[in-house]
Amino acid sequence: MKKWLFFLGLFPFFILQQALAAPSSTSSSQILFFYGQGCPHCAAVETYFEQNNLYGKYPIVRKEVYFNSENAQLFTKTMQELGVPADSVGVPTIVMGDKVITGDTPIIKNFVTDANAYLGRASPSSTPAITPAPTKPDLTLAAVIGASLVDAINPCAFAVLIILMTTIIASGDAKKALFAGLAFSTSIFISYFLMGIGIYKVLTFGSLSLIFFRIVGILAIILGLFNLKDYFWYGKGFLMEVPLSWRPSLKGLIKSVTNPLGAFFVGFLVSLFLLPCTSGPYIVILGMMARKSLQTQAIMYLLLYNLIFVSPMLVITLAVYKGFSPEKAEEMRLKRLRLLHLIAGVIMLAMGAVILLGWV
């Protein structure tokens, strides 16, 4: 009798366990809302949902993708399964079964009608609509282009390539100089791209905090001010170029190159020398991408960044091959050295302001 009472006492717990383990009847009708923290377009959608109490009226499940790797993976997998092209993937995105709505305006305009159809509800006589909150432009792409231009016009990169071209062209073989310049530029591109991927992974691994993001903005301001200092008081104090003590070793390394293969391998070593004066803009833009961009988008941004970064190297290489004197190129570089620092300073100050004002 006691055994029966014992089992009868356990029976309610068994029923409760089964109920909890059973799939929810509403799980198949969930509406997934993929968004990113800090995304202004996502904020507009959330404002619309909150002001119209749509979170209470519809089974909306929020999935933050910028700082939650599991949600980001689910987002990518869902988009792939639904056949959404990679270039159309972004947040905010609503998923209702096999229907996908992306963008704040389409979501706000169509959500209620599409959600009612998905859930089999009758559409109300009037669809709630509000004017979306003003959204700030996402300037990440503009920031990528701006930062890469700062690196592209960096006096360090120009100086290194000109030394290389002068050394090889002295042999009288213009074709060898052409291939050496192309190999060197390719090596720099690969090296910086791989370093960028590595830093991006590190920054996204710990979910970049808002505080660190603000620090990135302050860093951009500091770099901008240092570049402006080099425009007004060049050579005084800290110089935004390769440290003077490193330059003899750097020149010796470059002048040891005699063929394109050597130029390719030296490019990887030279990229380490360039880090003190080129890493600033790169770190700033990587910090922005770690907070604002998914991995696929970040890779595309990095490819664009580094293509712009090495483009002046390619131009100088082709110019020297066509007969332009490396000495003349060096003379032009020195003549415009302070102007390059001014341009870099203005761009970095603008990027810092954009970050601190929350426009990305």
Image (cartoon, rainbow, N blue to C red):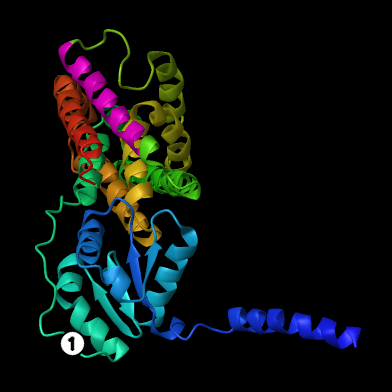
Q: Is residue 67 visible?
A: yes
| Picture quadrant of residue 65 | bottom left
Front residue of 200 and 278: 200
Left of 67 or right of it: where is 313?
Answer: left
Tell me which residue sits at (46%, 29%) in the image: 256
Tell me which residue sits at (23%, 33%) in the image: 352
Q: Is residue 63 above or below residue 179?
A: below
Q: Is residue 247 above or below residue 266?
A: above
Tell me which residue sits at (28%, 42%) in the image: 309
| Picture quadrant of residue 18 | bottom right
Front residue of 144 and 129: 129
Measured as percent of width and height from the top left, residue 118 is found at 29, 87
Residue carrying label 1: 123
Measured as percent of width and height from the top left, residue 43 is found at 24, 56
The kind of secondary structure the magenta stretch mainly shows is helix
Assign the N terminus to one quadrant of the image: bottom right
Residue extent of the magenta highlight: 213-232
Measured as percent of width and height from the top left, residue 240 is found at 30, 21
The magenta stretch spans residue 44:
no
Q: Is residue 356 above or below residue 330?
A: below
Left of 355 or right of it: where is 25?
Answer: right
Label 1: which secondary element = loop
Amino acid on which disc 1 is placed: Ser
Exactly how many numbered labels are in the figure? Answer: 1
Front residue of 344 and 316: 344
